[in-house]
Amino acid sequence: MGLIGTFRLKRRRVWLAAGAFSVVAVLGLLAGWFFPQQILCLDTGPGHGEVLVVLGGGSGERADRAAELFKAGVAPRILLSGAGDAQDNRRLLVARGVPAEAIEIEGDSKSTRQNAQFTVRSLRAEGVRRAVIVTSWYHSRRAYRCFRKYGPELEFLSRPAYYGYESARRARPVNWFIWEEYVKLAGYWVCYGVWPF
């Protein structure tokens, strides 16, 4: 095979690889559009822990879910993680019948990564071995994987809030929180080594 034949073969391989990548990208976008709950939501199912870890953000649904789990006896106390809205979530929890003395606050973290890093540090100091993460359904996979990365010796459960889940399940236009979560999921993998699956 001459030089021209080798060049043509290499060019054909590049085009085939580009075509295969394009097909995978389109299929990924379609899956992300029609099945966000299967990709983003991670619910480990029933189980008990020593503490419920409620991540900041959301629209109050995370505190609602934590109050529900607390009343069901899933864990005897709640740790709120997140700068800015931890106090708001504390007020919501107390208003929903959670005793103030059962609530702790980690109010320094400003990202999911910091939620995991700072909370894991507290859990280790307190000798906690098993914690239940409470966040929004679309944020649950990234949150769970972050906690597993920064606290590999600890056991974590994921019990997300399902506010907005049904509209995503019916394949209505997916809101920007979900598309932003796809970007963050990829970013956490590339930047911090948090493998999403």
Image (spheres, rainbow, N blue to C red):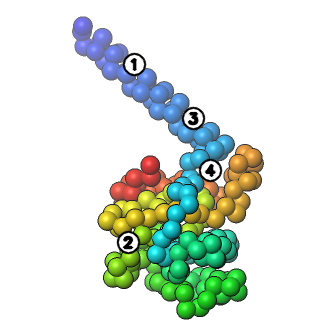
| Side (left or right) of 17 relative to 100 | left
Question: Which residue is rendered at x = 57% and y = 67% of the image?
Answer: 135
Q: In this rendered view, identify the residue nearer to me: 81 or 180.
A: 81
Residue annotated with mark 1: 12
Circles 2 and 3: CB atoms closer than 8 Å: no
Disc 2 residue type (three-letter): Arg
Residue type indicated by callout 1: Arg
Number of numbered callouts drawn: 4
| Residue 128: percent from left, percent from top | 38, 76
Q: Which residue lies furthest to the left in this view?
A: 2
Is residue 139 visible in this depiction of the protein? no
- Which tag is nearer the camera, tag 4 or tag 3? 4
What is the three-letter code of the residue carrying label 4? Gln
Neighbour class for label 3 at 10 Å: few (<14), some, many (≥20)? few
The tag earlier along the polypeptide, 3 or 1, is 1
Do labels 3 and 1 touch, CB within 8 Å?
no
Q: Name the residue under label 3.
A: 27
The N terminus sits in image quarter: top left
Instruction: Judge whether 63 appears above or below 43 on screen.
Output: below
Seen at 48% across and 63% down, the residue is 157
For residue 96, say whether it is visible: yes
> In the structure shown, which secondary structural element does the residue marked by tag 3 occupy?
helix
* Rendering coords of residue 92 (x, y %): 67, 83
Foreground: disc 2 or disc 3 = 2
Which residue is denoted by mark 4 in the rendering? 37
Residue type pointed to by label 3:
Leu
Q: Mark 2 = which residue?
A: 129
In the picture, residue 54 is in which quadrant?
bottom right
Nearest to N terminus: mark 2 or mark 4: 4
> Who comes first in sequence, dot 4 or dot 1?
1
Position of residue 154 relative to residue 51, above or below, is above
Q: Where is residue 149 in the image (x, y as percent from the top left)?
A: 36, 62
